[in-house]
Image (cartoon, grey):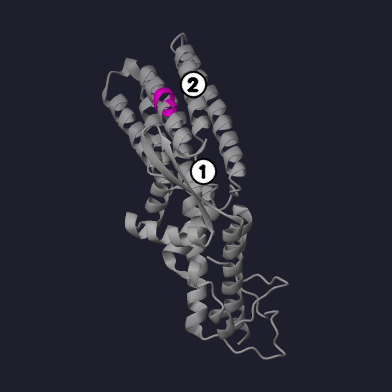
Amino acid sequence: MARSNAARVGAAAAPRSTPAQPAPGRAAAAQLDRLIHERVRLGIVSALAANEALSFNELKALLRTSDGNLSVHARKLEEAQYVACRKYFDGRVPRTEYRLTAAGRRALERYLDHMEALIKAARVG
Amino acid sequence: MLAPMPAHGPLRRSSGPEPTPPALHDRALDNLRFIRDTMERAGSFTAVPGWGMAAVGATALAAAALATRQATPELWLATWLAEAVVALGIGGWSLARKAHAANDPILSGPGRRFTLSFLPPLVVGGLLTIALYRAGLVAALPATWLLLYGTGVVTGGAFSVRIVPVMGLAFMAVGAVALLGPAGWGNWWMAAGFGGLHLLFGVIVARRYGG
């Protein structure tokens, strides 16, 4: 699944026919999923799309953000059920692990559709 | 870079969509780049094959034990060259297997960057092996191999998780000690580096980064 998303990002502007293609231009911008439009949340979703699961510390290092910032944004994604969070003990050390849910993956795909539509619209215009 | 865009977009030209402001277009491109870069960097968490490295370490220890029993420098060299072929096979196979398991195309993103940074020092190592052998300096080979392999891992690992360049530095440190230490200890530095360091870091990577 990561491969398909990565390939899509790499070929961002390749013409595709998507049944539910959003309207390009400002209308598309208005429909943006604000939940994952924010940089840290977009980073969390993108990183999890490339991995089955990542720990809190791995995400923190990857996105170069603080504990508090990551925690707040991860919780918002969790509330929207875009990511699933699992807390467990590795020996005596508490660990937090995140995974992307099917809804989260669909949200990322919709977001990619939006970005592609905006780019195509600019070319057409 | 993103793929070149088609000259003629397929979107509803006839219905006349409102042209996207350039700033919005640039932001969209920037967002796509951010997503791709994040996915690639996140991919490096799974790219390096830990168990493969540990297996290479085990074969290197066996090769060190075999090499020390060889009567001539030529046989000693042949033993290590055979080990290099085995190690490259194990390393390449386990890298491809792990990349495949993580749905990470090996020839794009982190895999390609690692390979492009890792290979040049290995090629130089191959050429120096020929030159040093012809000059009768077989005793200098262990330090050369350890230093150049370490260099490749440091440069390739610059794009990976931190433990990979740290492993490269450890190889360079063992190589430096081998370079300055007694010539007769070369085989043991090889065992410590290609055997011990691969085993140690391989197990750490495998346990922390998914195999």
The residue beneath circle 2 is B58
Query: With respect to residue A87, does B56 lie above or below?
Result: above
Q: Position of residue B54 (x, y in %)?
A: 48, 27
Residue sitting nearer the eye, B135 or B151: B151
Q: Type of residue at label 1?
A: Ala
Give the left or right position of residue B73, taking residue A100 as reference: left
Of circles 2 and 1, the one toward us is: 1
Q: Main secondary structure of the magenta part?
A: helix
Q: Residue at x 40, y 45 (%)?
A: B155
Q: Is residue B138 visible?
A: no
Residue sitting nearer the eye, B161 or B195: B161
Question: Which residues fall within the magenta stretch?
Answer: B194-199
The reply to whether the magenta stretch includes residue A56 is no
Give the left or right position of residue B23, taking residue B19 as reference: left
Residue sitting nearer the eye, B61 or A6: A6
Q: Position of residue B27 (x, y in %)?
A: 48, 76
Chain holding disc 1: B
The residue beneath circle 1 is B47
Q: Residue at x 47, y 29 (%)?
A: B130
